Amino acid sequence: MEPVLVGYVRRAHGINGAVVVRPLTDDPVGRWLPGAELASDGNPPITYVVSQVGPHKDGILVRFEGVTDRDTAEALRGTSFTIAADDRRELDAEEFWPDDLVGCTVVDEAGESLGTVESVEFGAAQDRLSVRTPNGVVEVPFVDAIVPTVDLDARTIVMTPPAGLFSES
């Protein structure tokens, strides 16, 4: 399984090695905590251990063991951090990991193909599925009324799209 992205460094903060991280996880408090081990996106990956975490207006303020000055922190700018897919939490019955949805075939209730999920876009009110169709990409609200069935075993998502959503995609 591919590693799962949990956040990336936006920039250094201050002179003592702190960085501002944008967390990309369903549980930032549980994932970004002192003692957490995260792998960098380097080749080869380097394991970083979180030593301190605090709130910040642009994400979270993080200090890693061994990163003690601004130059070292600045070198982490843009670094992404991952965990092993097996380290993710157990999902409830109606929850899905975004990477499990990507590549699923989207069909209407009659079984006619509408396209393929290209990505999952996260929103404040609701998430959206970006569906690649022969005519472009359509963003579909990921709500029960429009997406009643997700069958990961069959890699199929059944949609009941409102009139016109896919007509001019």
Image (cartoon, rainbow, N blue to C red):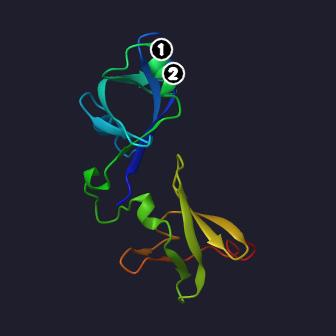
User: Hey, which residue is sitting farthest top in the picture?
Assistant: 15
In the rendered image, which quarter contains the N terminus? Answer: bottom left
Residue located 35% across and 61% down the image: 95
Q: CA distance from mark 1 to mark 2?
A: 6 Å
Where is mark 1, residue-wise?
Answer: 70
User: Hey, which residue is sitting farthest right in the picture?
Assistant: 168
Where is mark 2, residue-wise?
Answer: 74
Give left or right: position of 25 versus 88: right
Give left or right: position of 37 versus 130: left
Type of amino acid at the residue the image marks with label 1: Arg
Q: Where does the image place residue 12, in percent across and percent down from the top left?
A: 50, 20
Q: Where does the image place residue 19, in percent across and percent down from the top left?
A: 45, 23
Identify the secondary structure beneath mark 2.
Answer: helix
Q: Where does the image place residue 2, in percent across and percent down from the top left?
A: 38, 57
- Seen from the viewer's position, the closer of residues 58 and 86 is 86
Residue 38 against residue 110 in the figure, above or below: above
